[in-house]
Image (cartoon, helix red, strand yellow):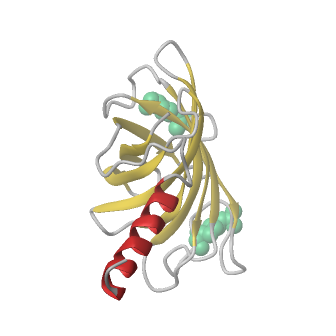
Amino acid sequence: MKSPTSFVFFLIFLLLIASSSAHPGMKKQHYPCKNLVFYFHDVIYNGKNANNATSAIVGAPQWGNLTILADKFHFGNIAVFDDPITLDNNFHSTPVGRAQGMYIYDTKNTYTAWLGFSFVFDSALHKGTINFIGADPIMVKSRDISVVGGTGDFFMHRGIATIMTDSFEGEVYFRLRVDIKFYECW
Ligand SMILES: *[C@@H]1O[C@H](CO)[C@@H](O)[C@H](O)[C@H]1NC(C)=O
Ligand SMILES: *[C@@H]1O[C@H](CO)[C@@H](O)[C@H](O)[C@H]1NC(C)=O
């Protein structure tokens, strides 16, 4: 080593080598390795549509009930859903899978839900699951949640899902467009 400076650079070089080989199996990329777009459709139970409903309120604050989402930005409501996933925005298109999980209204001064759900696929198109988690500030046009993992065709996949409300009909129906960008594939 000629100087202290070059020694420092040498150390940094060693650290870079060490960190790059720490996860040898991981394919980390700064651009998506896979991009998929889906829609899913949520028909909320409203006391009259038991046959058609794909989601049900299972938790409500003391000032609410399980039929109608509560006042005060639905704070305290928890809904469980089993929604059809389609490739286009038509509710009547043949579903390619199910979006299954829950949303929790967890903010008192605006409409925000916390999402935890899976896309479950079992068709010629896709087999396996994609698992999502994150805060969903519903009033924002485009919001990002985490794709924390997957199974089957999506084994060890991770990325970001951009969610947009594609249709909203009162408290009975909404449709979300989900633009999934995987940054880790396998
Ligand atoms: C279920 O949906 C169909 C088609 O949209 C509609 O004709 C019917 O009235 C609905 N039934 C109930 C109970 O909401
Ligand atoms: C649920 O709450 C809504 C709004 O407060 C009310 O109109 C409705 O009657 C309640 N339903 C039941 C079954 O208690």
Front-most of residues 21 and 167: 21
Q: Give the image quarter of residue 151.
A: top right
Residue 45's place in the image compared with 143, above or below, is: above
| Residue 171 seen in the figure | no
Q: Residue 16's x, y, as percent?
A: 43, 63
Residue 17 is left or right of residue 22, and the answer is left
In the image, 141 versus 149, the foreground residue is: 149
Q: Is residue 58 above or below residue 135?
A: above
Can see residue 177?
yes
Quarter the N terminus occupies: bottom left
Up-down: is 174 above or below 108?
A: above
Residue 68 or residue 141, whichever sits in front? 141
Residue at point 56%, 66% (across, down)? 69
Residue 45, given in percent of the width and then of the height, sits at 59, 49
Q: Position of residue 72 (x, y in %)?
A: 51, 81
Determine which quarter of the picture holds residue 93. Answer: top left
> Tag count in the figure?
0
Closest to the observer, 184 or 84: 184
Residue plotted at (27% across, 63% down): 141
Residue at the spot 38% in from the left edge and 60% down from the top edge: 144
* Residue at x 68% of width, y 68% of height: 65
Residue most extreme to the top: 124
Q: Where in the figure is residue 167, as x and y percent of width and height? A: 31, 49
